[in-house]
Image: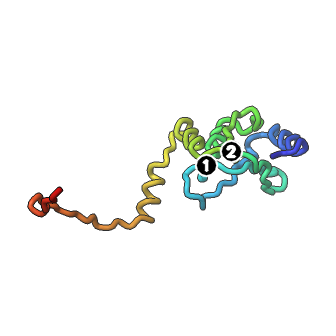
Amino acid sequence: MMSEAQRRVLKSFLERPIAYFDVDTDESKKSIVWQYFGELAYRDPETGKVSIIDRDRHYCSKCIAEHQERNPHETFEKCNICFLSNGTATGNHKNHLRLKHRITDDQHRLSIRGSKIKKRPSKVMIISLDDLVPVDN
């Protein structure tokens, strides 16, 4: 959880143009959401140095990229970028991607399953009524 001082620092960053922001994603995780959601990063326009400025929430990189394309000089806080707290289930992230950006994880799921699961031949058993033995009660 952020301290009051950390909140003030974050707020000062969010008053800067959205052109200087990015999302640090972790694509090593299985869910497709981690290709689009991650920690908020700021790139200093003078030095080029990139710093993670918010580790408490996951920000949508697609939202940021769309706003950067439309109006790179708009301040971050006015852009209504989607973010979810760290404890939020990935289902909420997926809902955002599906509803806002029309991104689904169907292809992602198929590629994971196809590469990790080896199909075994099915075993078929045929039972005939002639094979049944009567039981005396």
Q: Residue at x 71, y 49 (%)?
A: 22
Could you tell me residue 9's position as x and y percent? 87, 44
Q: In the visual, does 114 lie left or right of 33?
A: left
Tell which of 100 and 110 is nearer to you.
110
Could you tell me residue 85's position as x and y percent? 70, 43
Q: Residue at x 83, y 45 (%)?
A: 2
Q: Residue lying at the far front in this picture: please name it.
A: 137
What kind of element bears circle 2?
Answer: strand
Q: Residue at x 69, y 33 (%)?
A: 80
Q: CA distance from mark 2 to mark 1?
A: 8 Å
Name the quadrant of the C terminus.
bottom left
Q: Which residue is mark 1?
A: 36
Crowding at label 2, few (<14), some or many (≥20) Cα neighbours within 10 Å? many
Tell which of 13 and 8 is nearer to you.
8
Q: In the visual, does 61 lie left or right of 107?
A: right
106, above or below 69, in the image = below
Tell which of 14 and 32 is nearer to you.
32
68, above or below 107, in the image = above
The part of the image, by quadrant, that contains residue 25 is bottom right
Report the amino acid beneath label 1: Tyr
Report the amino acid beneath label 2: Tyr
Could you tell me residue 90's position as x and y percent? 59, 46
Tell which of 86 and 73 is nearer to you.
86
Q: Earlier in the sequence, mark 2 or mark 1?
A: 1
Q: Which residue is mark 2?
A: 59
What kind of element bears circle 1?
Answer: loop
Crowding at label 1, few (<14), some or many (≥20) Cα neighbours within 10 Å? many
Could you tell me residue 84's position as x and y percent? 68, 41
Q: Residue at x 78, y 53 (%)?
A: 52
Query: Which label was assigned to residue 111?
Result: none
Q: In the visual, does 103 lie left or right of 15?
A: left
